[in-house]
């Protein structure tokens, strides 16, 4: 069974989030670790998002491969590039706010990842089934903390009084 996730990039200038869907292995111990270890360069993150929706997140963006028989296992497998789906059907999604990004993801993905490039650039992970923030680190499995006390959103879907990204 798939563990679906959404991978997004926060734009502090416009306060929007561009994101893509990823079908397999979305849990922090897999996709979270890959993002923290291999996707810290903003240009590489843009390149990842420009691939559009993914079947598999890999350590590298990679090259076109046979979707049903990928020959390079460390690379991303994309629906458009590798399966030939129409790009407009699987291209990145632009959410007009952080709240919209979180709400959009609640119905489909178990984990929502967000790269925050300003200040101290870092990845955040939200478990949409528990409503908790998951701390992801390159060398451990991560721990969950209360999502709402993290200050990004309140349960009603808006920013909390002490919100920060």
Image: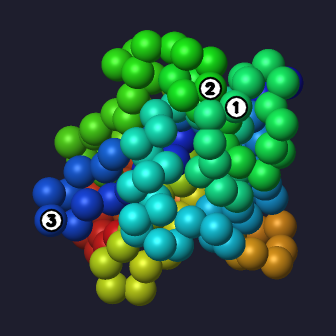
Q: Is 58 drawn above or below residue 53 in the view shown?
A: below
State if disc 1 and disc 2 touch (CB < 8 Å). Answer: yes
Quarter holding the C terminus is bottom left
Q: Position of residue 142 (x, y in %)?
A: 76, 68
Outermost bottom residue: 120
Residue position for label 3? 13
Q: Is the residue marked by circle 2 packed among few (<14), some (14-19), or many (20+) residues within 10 Å?
A: some
Name the secondary structure under disc 1. Answer: loop
Does residue 60 appear in this view? yes
Q: Where is residue 60 in the image (x, y as percent from the top left)?
A: 65, 56
Does residue 144 appear in this view? no
Q: Quadrant of residue 129?
A: top right
Q: How is the image coloured?
A: rainbow
Relative depth, front residue between 42 and 22: 42
Relative depth, front residue between 69 and 141: 69
Residue position for label 1? 65
Q: Which of marks 3 and 1 is nearer the N terminus?
A: 3
Mark pair 2, 1: CA separation? 5 Å
Residue position for label 2? 82
Q: Earlier in the sequence, mark 2 or mark 1?
A: 1
Instruction: Tell me what residue is drawn at x 70 percent, y 58 percent.
Output: 59
Outermost left residue: 14
Instruction: Tell me what residue is drawn at x 49 percent, y 49 percent.
Output: 48
Name the secondary structure under disc 2. Answer: helix
Q: Position of residue 3 (x, y in %)?
A: 75, 34
Mark pair 3, 2: CA separation? 33 Å
Q: Position of residue 88 (x, y in %)?
A: 35, 19
Instruction: Tell me what residue is drawn at x 31 percent, y 49 percent.
Output: 17
Q: Is 109 drawn above or below residue 150 in the view shown?
A: above
């Amino acid at each position: 069974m798939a563990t679906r996730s959404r991978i997004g990039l926060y734009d502090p200038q416009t306060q929007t989030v561009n994101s893509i869907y990823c079908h397999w292995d979305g849990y922090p111990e897999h996709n979270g670790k890959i993002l923290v270890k291999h996707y810290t360069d903003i240009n590489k993150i843009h390149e990842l998002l420009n691939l559009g929706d993914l079947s598999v997140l890999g350590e590298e963006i990679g090259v076109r491969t046979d979707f049903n028989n990928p020959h390079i296992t460390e690379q991303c497998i994309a629906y458009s590039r590798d399966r030939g789906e129409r790009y407009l059907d699987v291209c990145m999604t632009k959410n007009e706010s952080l709240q919209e990004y979180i709400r959009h993801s609640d119905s489909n993905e178990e984990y929502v990842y967000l790269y925050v490039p300003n200040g101290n650039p870092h990845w955040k992970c939200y478990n949409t089934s528990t409503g908790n923030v998951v701390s992801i680190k390159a060398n451990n499995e991560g721990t969950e903390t209360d999502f709402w006390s993290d200050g990004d959103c309140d349960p009603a879907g808006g920013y909390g009084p002490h919100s920060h990204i």
